[in-house]
Amino acid sequence: MPSVLYISYDGIMEPLGQSQVVRYMERLSPEYSIHLISFEKSDDLLDVFRLEALKESLKRHGIKWTRLTYHKRPAVFATLLDILNGLTVAGWILFRHKIKIIHARSYVPSLIAVLLKKITNVSFIFDMRGFWADERVDGDIWLANSNIFRITKWLEKQFFINADYVVSLTNAAVDEIRTFPYLVNRMPKIQVITTCTDLKLFKPLSEVTSNARSFTLGYVGSVGVWYLFDEALRCFIEIKKTIPEAKLHIFNKGDHDYIFRHIKKLGIDTKSVLVESGDHTDVVNAMQLMDAGVFIIKPVYSKLASAPTKLGEFLGCGVPCLCNTNVGDMAQIVEKEGVGVALKGFSEEEINNSVSRFLTLIKEPDIKRDCRNAALKHFSLDDGVKLYNEIYQSLLN
């Protein structure tokens, strides 16, 4: 079987790594000899039970996993150390196992991959996952006139120019990439593969018991940096004007103090809010009992390339979504498929009008079926795996 080296700077012990790395690799493993390098957080590696379970699962699929430790501080030095470690290990695997393709997930792995491509001419997939340098500026981590930003944008240029294939999460990002001056007449092969969902796992309940409980608005995941949590809470306040008994179910890993501070700041009765945390299976169980989902993302430049995993997960469970425009292809999907409403702004009037439209939409008798069909159309993991397989085959032939 052809050998593929997949490098992820995200740890595969994290929920994102589980859904967006492991699920794909497991399904590709029957056709390829897969070597996987990931950078894991020290705390995750201390969870021996989860670590051993993951090692055993990957072994069953024939995936050879090399775990490197992710270093966070001091920021630049730590990243350089990770690059050096990754380059050393990836280089050894490349020569030892006659790797044909390096599949690099995001920017740090792509730097490792492009350096090895210069030496060996191995095929390189730039699976960009977003405009990472611009995300650092939009997130107020870097300054737009800083050296680190300029260097990273120069590296981004090298990734696009040297990639044998580029994978983007969104069509909106592809449209933007086509405007880059240095890619005029040298546009790389590019394929959109969004954040796909395991729809065998994220599916509606077979028995619906909504008549026996209050209307539940769901919020799943992070509340900071990119997420405008207060705006989501304002939507809930507006919903309660029409449905006074409505409940807000928040599923979040570790920001509970922050969540309750903001709930109290906006005058929301804490008795109408349930805040929980749990593992991937608990997320599925929670989503299946939600009547609607809400998530509002900061509409900045870098988010053109973003595709929140929770959209496919909500829709897979038959849950319509209240979201916002100018974030990847999200608004176009929910509005075109009739499975949600996208806010065009955050004024009182816009929130009122959007919530009113949303409450009308979710009364549609076939809304759960429409959500499920939209998930199958746009977020199928099987379709995503098929597209990756086509890329691999095109590079091998």
Image: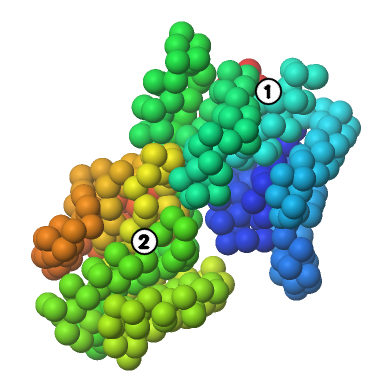
Q: Could you classify mark 2 by the number of other residues whose Cα lies within 10 Å: few (under 14), some (14-19), or many (20 or more)?
A: some
Judge whether 285 appears above or below 141 on screen: below
Asked where in the image residue 209 lies, by quadrant, the reply is bottom left
Q: Secondary structure at mark 1?
A: strand
Q: Which one is nearer the viewer's eye here, 32 or 117?
A: 117
Q: Please tell me which residue is depicted at 73% across the width and 22% down the height of the picture.
A: 117
Judge whether 173 appears above or below 380 on screen: above
**Could you say where residue 289 lies in the image, as x and y percent from the top left?**
35, 76
Q: Could you classify mark 1 by the number of other residues whose Cα lies within 10 Å: few (under 14), some (14-19), or many (20 or more)?
A: many
Q: Secondary structure at mark 2?
A: loop
**Could you say where residue 194 lies in the image, as x and y percent from the top left?**
44, 42
Q: Please tell me which residue is depicted at 77% across the width and 41% down the height of the picture.
A: 80
- The residue to which callout 1 is attached is 123
Q: Is residue 186 visible?
A: yes
Q: Please tell me which residue is depicted at 24% across the width and 68% down the height of the picture.
A: 235
Q: Is residue 93 visible?
A: no
Residue kind at label 2, given as amino acid type: Leu
Ranked by sequence position, the earlier of labels 2 and 1 is 1
Tell me how far mark 2 sits from mark 1, CA to CA.
39 Å
Quarter of the picture containing the N terminus is: top right
Residue kind at label 1, given as amino acid type: Ser
Q: Which one is nearer the viewer's eye here, 62 or 48?
A: 48
Q: Please tell me which residue is depicted at 36% across the width and 27% down the height of the picture.
A: 175
Judge whether 24 appears above or below 125 on screen: below
- The residue to which callout 2 is attached is 228
Asked where in the image residue 357 lies, by quadrant, the reply is bottom left
**Could you say where residue 268 lies in the image, as x and y percent from the top left?**
28, 83
The single residue placed furthest to the top in the displayed view is: 185
